[in-house]
Amino acid sequence: MAEQPRAGWDRTTSLAALGDFVAAAARVNHVVARRAGLTETELVALQHLSREEIEGGSIGPAEIARRLDVSTAAATGIVDRLVNRAHVERRPHPDDRRRTTLHITPSGRREVVTQLLPMFIALDELDRELSEADREVVAAYLRRATEAFERVTRPPDPAGADSRM
């Protein structure tokens, strides 16, 4: 049997706050997608493309499929719908003419940013209130919390090594 967390583990103030944060974050994509007339998967695809553009890169449909954990056929349908709404453009890959890259358009960026801007402003204000030392503590906690979450999203270990928390 897998190890169990200690009794009362979920009643600490930090874990309660993290639970509230996760629940609120989970609602964001649902609400934003509905307001924008998109599916949540389409919104997440736009978020990936926006992030990729900010980082100076580009990705193709196969990478979208991998990031969304959907089949390439499903990713093609998602991309087609976003292209039809003029939120995404397909462009030839600069080094491989058999491939295409996907790029978020100004309307796609507007769709994401307009809905999320109030949250970004509030998070920026909150971050500016923290000292650098506090920021480091929060960042360390969130990185480790992310690692804990990723235990659920990793492929299962056939030997069962990942079944422990």
Image: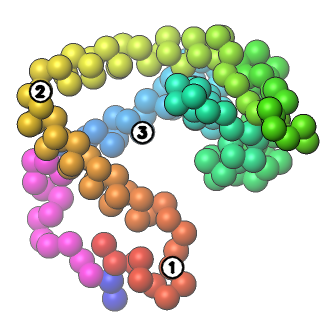
**Residue at image mark 1:** 157
The secondary element bearing badge 2 is classed as loop
Q: Residues within 10 Å of mark 2 (few under 14, many from 20)?
A: few
Camera-nearest label, 1 or 2: 2
Q: Place residue 162 in its image quadrant.
A: bottom left
Q: Nearer the viewer, mark 3 or mark 1?
A: 1
Which quarter of the figure has residue 3? bottom left
> Is residue 121 part of the magenta span, yes or no?
no
Mark 3 sits on what residue?
Answer: 26
Picture residue at 68% right of the left edge, 38% below the top: 59
| In-image side of 146 versus 52 (left or right) | left
> Which secondary structure, mark 1?
loop
Q: Nearer the viewer, mark 3 or mark 2?
A: 2
Q: Residue at x 66, y 11 (%)?
A: 107
Can residue 34 be seen?
Answer: yes
Magenta residues, as a range?
3-16
- For label 3, the SS is helix
Of all residues shown, which one is farthest toward the front? 95
Does residue 29 appear left or right of residue 21 in this picture?
right
Query: Which residue position holds label 2?
Result: 130
Marks 3 and 2 in Cβ contact (< 8 Å): no
